[in-house]
Amino acid sequence: MRNTIEEGNVPLYQQLKNILKGQMLSGVLKPGDQIPSESELCRIYGVSRITVRQAVRSLVDEGFLYRKQGKGTFVASPKLRRRLPKLYSFSEDMMELGLRPSSKLLEQTVIEVDEELAELLRLPSANRQVNKLVRVRMANDEPILIERTLVPVYLCPDLWKEDLERGSLYAILREKYGLLLDHAYETYEVGKVRKDEARSLGCRVGSPAFIIERFTYLRNEVPVELTRSVARGDRLRFTVKLVADQAQIRREIEF
């Protein structure tokens, strides 16, 4: 594989991008490794800062690299896969993938919601209070998504006291409050990372994102959770298992 850059038909930034990508794919650069600084790349490959920045920005946009503010640029892990329609906990899902889950708590408080949200969560008329949690969810210290969660106070009155930077929300609901989550409905939209989200997610404003809304229920259809998330599109991949309708197949064969 060529590791030198020469004037020619292929743009200089593309040559540098190909070299760095080749090093990542071959294992010379591994997930979590910091790549050389801009000045070092300029010196090693004899190119300008503009060329380096264009190549690195392109690799960041494609999910091969990610930036940590004030620290540098690092090699990203392969995209994280989340299986659908499995009812998942972020913490438990990441541990299954062999990754270390963690959270950065941005907000943890009790608020009163408006009539529309009270109806969606089927709150008692005398108690419209909910626990509000805003967390950045990370895998191996890399930001993956921002979760904004509402949980009814009448179901979990002391939830605001829990350590939700280290603990799993679903584990607390299950073990402390005896709430056995049965099913959830999720909707997915394609969106972009807003300015107020980009810093927490460690990506650029306008980067592609999954906008996810989840309602989680007990078996008796009592709503327990409403979570609206913004997930980095460059770091997540959702997998759905599609099962054929065997009865329909049999009918088609018979006729």
Image (cartoon, helix red, strand yellow):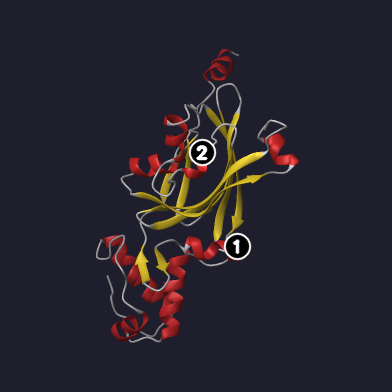
Q: Nearer the viewer, mark 2 or mark 1?
A: 2
In this orientation, which residue lies closer to the viewer: 25 or 206?
206
Q: Earlier in the sequence, mark 2 or mark 1?
A: 2
Q: Quick one: label 1, few (<14), some, or many (20+) residues within 10 Å?
A: some
Give the x, y percent position of residue 129: 64, 40
Give the spatial CA distance, label 2 vs label 1: 32 Å
Q: Which residue position holds label 1?
A: 194
- Residue at horizontal 55%, vertical 36%? 157
For the question of whether residue 10 can be seen, the reply is: no
Say which element carries label 1. Answer: loop
Q: In this rendering, is residue 129 above or below 43?
A: above
Q: Where is the C terminus found, in terms of image quarters?
A: top right
Q: Is residue 76 left or right of residue 184?
A: left
In this orientation, which residue lies closer to the viewer: 83 or 14?
83
Q: Quick one: label 2, few (<14), some, or many (20+) residues within 10 Å?
A: few
Residue 158 is tagged as 2
Give the x, y percent position of residue 76: 37, 60
Residue 66 found in image quarter: bottom left
Say which element carries label 2. Answer: loop
- Residue at horizontal 37%, vertical 76%? 16
- Residue at horizontal 39%, vertical 51%? 102
Q: In this rendering, is residue 65 above or below 174?
A: below
